Image (cartoon, grey):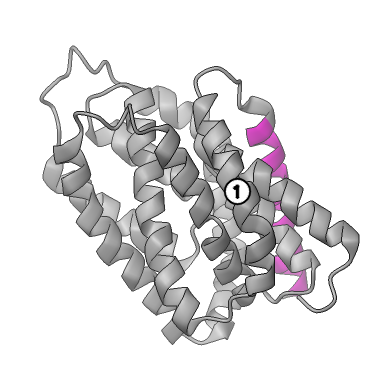
Amino acid sequence: MTDPGALQIVLLVVLGLLAGAVNAIAGGGSLIVFPVLLATGLPPLPANVTNSVAQWPGYAGSTLSARTDLGGQGRRIAITTIPAVLGSALGCALLLVLPQSVFDAIVPVLVLLASLTLGAQPWIKRWTSRDGESEAGRERPAALAIVTFLAAVYGGYFGGALGVVLIAVLSLLCADSMRRLNAVKVLLSLVVASVTVVLFGFFAPVDWFAVLLLAPSTLIGGYLGMAIAQKMPDNVLRFSVVVLGVAVAIYLFVKG
């Protein structure tokens, strides 16, 4: 960001707060920040890596807020954490190794798919919803590890609506309440984000001034968002993010 205006600074701070809350409640908060970073003049690749790094505090806040719901899920966390680390590292490597032209070509498709996935979240929840008590023991650890790895590759490469993908995977392959699975979702999002912070911090064109503006607000938003995840309807937030994401995808298609 070169010589950002006051409006851009305010937007980044406010939308960082909203993104942190949306990631905790519904997933897809990165789709809120990404277009604003583009609007500040950042190209798609720097905007993407900056966005990924800036989301880390939000996931940390959400995980801290969800610590009670993580209790008793040690085996599930162990099964998914290592694949999440390996997958996100591979996704980051692909982003850094492949030519920027590949990212420029694929990012509109990823934004569009992530936005549509976020819009379909209510149907995904209904389709994958399980009664944790009646289906206890129907875990699929091998499949869970493999699919978590694939989701983390996506998260390392782009990551928009990663939370939606993760909660769908967890709901389909695990027998538990949505609240407890949502806690694992934010923890795995934190794992993926931690890998991106390390790799992108050293090897990618991160705009650290933008991260400095976004990090505190995503932290607060993530903590508060997780605290009210079971009380606040997320339909309006989801609809807004989907519309915004589709608009960004169209803009990137036209621009490209």
User: Residue 87 at x, y = what percent?
Assistant: 30, 64
Magenta span has 208?
A: no
Quarter of the image with the N terminus is bottom right
Give the main secondary structure, helix, strand or loop, of the magenta stretch: helix
Would residue 154 be seen by someone viewing this image from the given angle? no
Q: Quadrant of residue 37?
A: bottom right
Residue at (31, 58) in percent of width and height: 150
Magenta span has 254?
A: yes
Callout 1 environment at 10 Å: few (<14), some (14 to 19), or many (20+)? many
Residue at (14, 20) in percent of width and height: 136
Viewed as shown, does residue 28 lie left or right of 245?
left
Q: Is residue 41 above or below residue 225?
A: below
Determine whether the residue tagged by mark 1 lies in a helix, strand or loop. Answer: helix
User: Residue 15 at x, y = what percent?
Assistant: 72, 48
Instruction: Using the image as rendered, state which of residue 227 and residue 123 is in the foreground.
Output: 227
User: Residue 33 at x, y = what percent?
Assistant: 67, 55
Q: Is residue 226 above or below residue 8?
A: above
Would residue 110 be seen by someone viewing this image from the given angle? yes
Quarter of the image with the C terminus is bottom right
- In the picture as drawn, the residue positioned furthest to the top comes out as 134
Residue on which the image places disc 1: 218
Q: Quadrant of residue 205?
A: bottom right
User: Residue 238 at x, y = what percent?
Assistant: 63, 35
Viewed as shown, does residue 125 lie left or right of 131?
right
| Type of amino acid at the residue the image marks with label 1 | Thr
Residue at (62, 76) in percent of width and height: 46
Instruction: Using the image as rendered, state which of residue 136 and residue 200 is in the foreground.
Output: 200
Residue at (52, 43) in percent of width and height: 117
Q: Which residues are magenta?
A: 237-255
- In the picture as drawn, the residue positioned furthest to the right comes out as 6
